[in-house]
Structure formats: structure tokens, C-alpha cells
Amino acid sequence: MSERKKIKSKNKSSLLLRLKKTAGPQTVDAAKFAKNVDKRTGALTALIMLFFIVLIVRVASIMIEKGDAYTMQVLSQQQYTSTEIPYKRGSILDCNGAVLAQSEKVYKLILDSKLVLEGEKKNGNMQSTLDLISKEFDLSKSDIENYINSNPTDQYKVIKKEVTYSEKTAYEELIKKTNAELRKAASTNAAGLEKNKLINESAVSFESYYRRVYPGGALAGDVLGYVSDAKGRYGLEGYYDDVLTGDNGREYGYLTDENALERTVMPSKDGYSLVTSIDSYIQKICENEIIQYNEEHANEFREGEPGSENTGVIIQNVHTGEIIAMASYPYYNPNNPKDLSMYTEETVSSMKARAMERYSVSEDAEVCDAVSAELWKNFCIQESYEPGSVCKTFTLATGLDTGVVTDHDIYDCGGSLTFGEGNNAVTIRCHNRLGDGPLTTKQALEKSCNVALMKMGQKIGKDDFLKYNKNFGFGLKTNIDLEGEMVTSSLVFNENTMGLTELMTSTFGQGYNVTMIETITAFSSLVNGGTLYKPHVVKKLVNSDGSVVKTIKPEAVRQVVSREVSDQMIEYCIGVVDEGTGTRAKPAGYRIGGKTGTAEYSGKGKVDYTVSFMGFAPADDPQIAIYVVIDRPNTASQENGTRYACLLCRDILNEVLPYMHIPKTEIISDEERAEQDIPDTASLIPSLSDNTVSEDEAVSGNDTPAEDTQNGTENDNAANDESLEEPLISGPVAVAGEENRDNENQDNETETENTEITEDTGNTETE
């Protein structure tokens, strides 16, 4: 090594030696460590940067591929308000637009305990707030305060279920006024704002919903039904529940195309409204008259009972099948279906007694439920009974239409008719046991002669009789648009259950059961030209803005008899009222047609009746049919019951026909004036026809012959009243299909011998 290199090496070693002496060996190791750390940090930084680059690339990929989905998921998990907006149930209107049922917006009063206590902590105003709430909504302050103290974090407690809009707005205005006055007074008050008197606006809130309201109270309750738990029950409410029901809306969070959360509202969809054929005025007339009848005849024969167990009235448009009025007794108020406050204590007791007997219940709650179940039944469509002699019209029409009965036939009534031989012989007696002698076809109906009708039945035969009865709709549902129509298929005879005896008794309406709606629908076909129309109550469906959604047109089901036969039946039924058993049903100044009916049934040691009158008006051009049924009238005699049915029909038509602008065409006698409380000036309403008698002519003194004729007719027909005598059936009687009938209405025994059966019934009495 050269001398120069040796010197440099020596100098370097000397330098290192000096460094070690001054800094020590640790300084040299730290420097070395720092150098290593720098290398590792760089590597770690590079690795982290690489990881973030990969992560960013991955996130970018996810955002491109599934960004919207993940954004929706995240936002959907965020808390935001979603409020249901209730729909409004459709209204029910009468034919003139009067509201029969509607939904009214009301509110639940919601208490927020948490906010009340926060207000108390901040302003000390819980007492003043609760004072106002309890006063305005008639609530117990102590109950509210106890609940708040027991549930300090609760934010939803319904303290009043029903608050009207006016109550709500009055409360809100009162809060604003009270707080404003306090703040205004604070500006001049040295003590400043009295915070403890401020009303906590957040203490309660209002949650809207709709309640069902029936402005007419009990008016047309049986037709309407009612709403419970947001579902329609019975009547139109039940039958059209899906139509009346709408869809709830909602206020909720909505994600836009820019993934921004906005608040929006999906409006509710209200239900459709129903426009019915019911005329509220006529409906009210019918209801008032049947209520008056039942009140006037309460306790007449049976103590503690109203004038009947059931009373029903239907008025129908004979040319369309539309129901103009349908009323029954007992009735209920759909605003409060279980309320019995409209009845006397005696009537309620009798209702409970019948319910206990019919449903075999004894517990108070069960009895009340049974009474309600009976009240909610629509007697006009949900109960059956034996129709009695009103069905003689269908027997006669069948005979005329098949040609086996003519207008010129003569039927000799000796008081009874025997058929069969030997031990199988059966004798059926007429209500006039002395016999009516020779009768024309028209007179047979006017006098309601059983013997003549049975002879017609023999001519008609079982096959045609059953065929026409089915065509008239007996045993078939009419499919009226009311919930709960009774099916009577098991309550009428058929090919297998009708023998000769059953055929004979059926000719005068005995041994089988029907409903009121079946019977009046069939009767309308007899006087409208022979066409059977499907009965219906609803004419139109309309939406919330009044636009017609659907029109329900009259539906002709079938032609049951010819127009010629229909014309003959109109003439015959007019004769029943003019000269026969239905004279008491004639409204003053009008000419109508119709037929009386009486059915007797017994059981459990008592005898009861179902009496009826079925008619049409006006006589020369039938527009409406009316059917009055009194089930178990509170009277001692069948005669009185039949008379009551006729008089009830008369009283109803006396108001209905003038309202319908149907002119009076008949002379009003002094007897009619006195009996029907008609003023002297109300002789008749002039007809629009040129041929109608004028009012001057009506009061000119020419009414004397008419008066005499009327009096004579009344007296003569008293002996012919079908209700005065009971017809009898003697001999072995087998009433087929007995096991299917209401046990309360039937008391026949198939093995009974030597028996008697009254005219309009299936019950037997040992002779």
C-alpha cells in the first residue's frame, strides 16, 4: 500500500475511534435502525397505497354495477315517517239523492307522555296543558296524569276514540289564542312570560279516520245493514261491501332518479257510492205505520207483547222489479245496532223471552246477543212463513195460462171437497162450511173459496202446478242485492214430496213456506203483463266525483204467464177489493186490486196466525205492488188479524199514492171520511185524463148511491170474509218435506188420522 493510502486509512480509523468515544456505540446503532425503518416504511406505504387503489377500483366497480341497489338498501334502512291515509267508504243514497248512509271524518285523540314531560321539564306547564285537554274533551285529568307518570316514555296512547272535526279545530284555535295572549301580555308584564301557563301544543295529536253515519237513524235499517270493524254487515252494506270499500293511501319516502329521498303522497281511493231505488219518504211512511200499528195493538191479547212478532211491508215497481220501500218490525238503528232504547221495557222483556226460547240461551250476554241477532234479520227476505190465500192468485193464473181454467167455468161449493177412496179418503172443508154454492171463476177468487181452488188444482195436475210454481220463483232465491236472503228450496214441494193432498192444500197456500220477497216478485209478474223481474235495490254505482260507473238495468228473468192472463188477473184482483174479502184495504178515492191471505200454525199449546194483504195500484194501470204481512198479530181472532193487514195497507196507500201523483178517481163516501179521517174538501184529486171525474162532480151529491153500494158491499162481504171460518181437512194427511220446515211453524204428524187442518196452514188438530 502506498504511503498516501496508509495515512488515509489511519486517519479514518482514528476518526471512528473519536466518534465512538464522543457519541457512544448506541448512536451508531440508531442511525443504522433509522435507515432500516425508512426502507420498511416505504414498503408499507407502497403496500397501503396499492390496497387503497384496489379498494377504490372495487368500489367503483360496485357503484357502476349495483350502485342504485345498494343506495336503495341503505336508504330503506333509514328511519322516516310512513303514514296511512284512510279511504272514504262510499255513500248510500235514495232515489232522489238523499243520503241514507255516509262516512264522516273523525279523529282519535293521541297522548304523547314523553313530550308532555319534556314540556314540564322546560316550562313547568303539564298541569295547565292537562287542564285544557280534560276540559275540552270531557276527560278525567287524574286518569291522564296517572297514565303519563306510569308510562313516561310512551308516545302513543288513544285517550279518546272519537273527536269531531269541530272539536279538533276548536281545541287547536284555543291553544293558539291562549299562548298568543300569554306572549302578548309578557311584553308589558314586568315578571315576563308565564311559561307554566303555556299550553304544550305537542301534548296530543289527532289521527284521522272515517266513521259510518246513518243520518236517518233507524230509517231503512234493514235495507242498509251496518258497518262493524270496517266491514259491512247485512243489507246493502254487506252485499256491496267490496264496492263500497276503497283503498288506503300512504304518505311515505320516495327515491328519485337522482337517489334523493323525498316525501310524497299516494292518495287513497274512495269506495263507490250506491244510488238506490228506495224512496225515503215512502220508506218513512211504511215504517211509521207499522210502528204505530205495533204500539196501538200492544197488550191487546198477549200481555207484555207488541202488536205482532214481526210485521213486514214491501212496495215494488211492478215493471222493473225495483224496491221502492222495504220495512219491518222490530227494527234497529244502524248507528248503534244493539240499542233497544226505542222499545218499552215490556217489549224488550218479550224479545228476550222469545230469544231465550228460540236459541236455548240463558246467560245475560247470550240473551242480548240473541236479541240482536233477531233484530238484525230482515223479515222481508230472511224469514219464511206459509203464505195462505194470497197464493190462490198463482193457482188461478196457472189454470188460466194452461187453458184448463176459463173465465166461464162454474164451481159449486158445498162447504167441503172429498177425494180418495175408503180409508184413504180425505175431506177438506172451506172456510164457509155451509158452502158458497155455484161460483164463477172470478167469484171463486173474490170469496177465497178453497173448494173452487182445489177443483182448479185437480184440473191443473201436479206436474203443471209444480212447473208454474217454479217459474213464479217459489223455492228459488230471487238474488235480490241484499245480504242474507233465505233459501226456501227445502220448504216447497217437489215431484217426490207432492201427493194429491199436498197438491190440494197448495192450491190455497198451505203446507209450504215462502219469503215476502219471493211472493211480491211473483205477484208483480201477474199484473205487469206476465214478466218476472229480478228484484233489486241499487240502480247505479257512482264514484267520488259523482260520475256513473255502472247502471243496473231491470233484468227480466222469464215470461211466466201471457199478457191476456195478466189482464184477467188484474180484473179478478180488482174484484177482490171491490166486492170480496179485501174491501177494507181500499184507500179513499182510489181503486186498487189485491188478495188477502191467512195462515194458521200452532205449537206448544198456542195458536197463532200470519195474516197478509197483497195488492197493486192504480187499478187501471198497475205501477206498484204492495205486500203487507203481520206475523203472529197480538189478537184473539183470525178475523181481526186479516182486517188489520188490510187496514195497514190502506193507511200506507192513503199517503203513498198522492205522493206519487197518482190521481184519485173514486167517489169518497161519508163512511170513508169518518173512518179514515178525511176532510170534506178532500173528495178526490182531479186526474190529468180528460175522462176523469172532476172535483165538482165528485161533491155534487151524486155520491149517495156509491155510499150505499159501499155500505152494502161491506155488510155483504162480512159473511164472506175468509177469516171468519176455519176450513177443515178430514182424513189421513201426510205433509211431505215436513222435516225440512221450521218446527215452530209446523205441527203436522204424518201418521195422524181423523184430523182437521185450517185453511192456510199445515198444522193439524185432532177432530
Image (tube, rainbow, N blue to C red):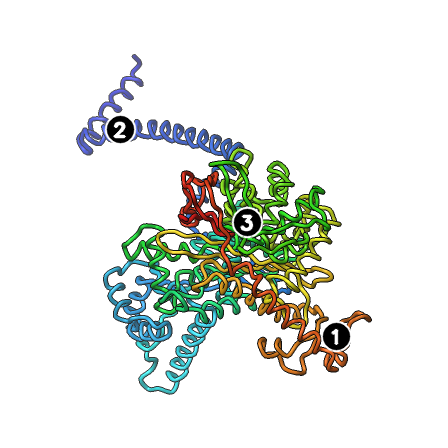
Circle 3/circle 2 CB separation < 8 Å: no
Residue tagged by mark 1?
Answer: 686
Left or right: 603 with respect to 655? Answer: left
Q: Secondary structure at mark 1?
A: loop
Task: Indicate which label's residue lies in the foreground, 2 or 1.
Answer: 1
Of labels 3 and 2, earlier in sequence is 2
Label 3: which secondary element: strand
The type of residue carrying mark 3 is Ser
**Label pair 1/3, CB-CB below 8 angstroms:** no
Comparing labels 1 and 3, the label whose residue is closer to the camera: 3
- What residue is rendered at 26% in x and 28% in y? 33
- As helix, strand or loop, the secondary structure at mark 2 comes to helix
Residues 580 and 204: in front is: 580
> What residue is disc 3 on?
416
Is 317 drawn above or below residue 79 in the view shown? below
Which of the marked residues, 1 or 3, is nearer the chain's N terminus? 3
In the image, which is nearer the foreground, mark 3 or mark 2?
3
Amino acid type, mark 1: Pro
Return the x and y of residue 80 as percentages of the image width and height. Answer: 43, 51
Q: Is residue 268 above or below residue 173?
A: above
Residue at (57, 76) in percent of width and height: 675
Pointer 2: what residue? 33
- Calculate the distance from the C-alpha at mark 1 to the C-alpha at mark 3: 47 Å
